Image (cartoon, rainbow, N blue to C red):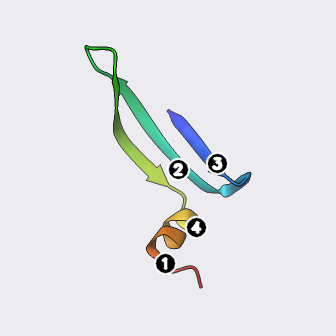
Amino acid sequence: MVSVVINKDNELNINYNLIENKDGSYHSAYYSTSPRLSKLLKGNNE
């Protein structure tokens, strides 16, 4: 699991899981965002 915190604000984060492919590359299996980041990305940051 990889967690990315934006601007050192723990309420603005995204988490995702990386899966290794047979060739050594990776792909993302799933991800989740914090509610606050989700609102910002949707443009509902009132």
Query: Residue type at mark 4?
Result: Arg
- The residue tagged with tag 2: helix, strand or loop? strand
Quadrant of the image containing the C terminus? bottom right
The answer to whether marks 4 and 1 mark residues whose Cβ atoms lie closer than 8 Å is no
**Left or right of residue 13: residue 27:** left
Q: Earlier in the sequence, mark 4 or mark 2?
A: 2
Give the residue at x 44% y 73%: 42
Q: Which amino acid does label 2 sit on?
A: Ile
Q: Earlier in the sequence, mark 2 or mark 3?
A: 3
Whole-percent x, y for residue 26 in the image: 35, 26
**Quadrant in which residue 36 is drawn:** bottom right
Query: Would residue 23 appear left or right of 34 to someone viewing this image?
Result: left
Q: Where is residue 9 in the image (x, y as percent from the top left)?
A: 72, 56
Q: Which of marks 1 and 2 is nearer the N terminus?
A: 2
Compare marks 1 and 3 and give the one earlier in the sequence: 3
Q: Where does label 1 land, which residue?
A: 43
Query: Which numbered disc, 4 or 1, marks the residue that appears first in the sequence?
Result: 4
Q: Which of marks 1 and 2 is in front?
A: 1
Q: What residue is drawn where x is 45% and y is 41%?
A: 16
- Residue 36 numbered mark, or none: 4
Residue at left offset 50%, top offset 44%: 15
Going by the picture, which residue comes out furthest to the bottom? Answer: 46
Q: Which residue, given by chain and number where applicable, does mark 2 sit on? A: 14
Q: In this view, does 36 lie above or below 20?
A: below
Label 2 Cα neighbours within 10 Å, binned few <14 / some 14-19 / many ≥20: some
Q: Name the residue under label 3.
A: 5
Q: Could you tell me how far apart the alpha carbons at marks 4 and 2 are, in whole angstroms?
A: 10 Å
Q: Distance between the residues labelled 1 and 3?
A: 19 Å
What residue type is disc 1 on?
Gly
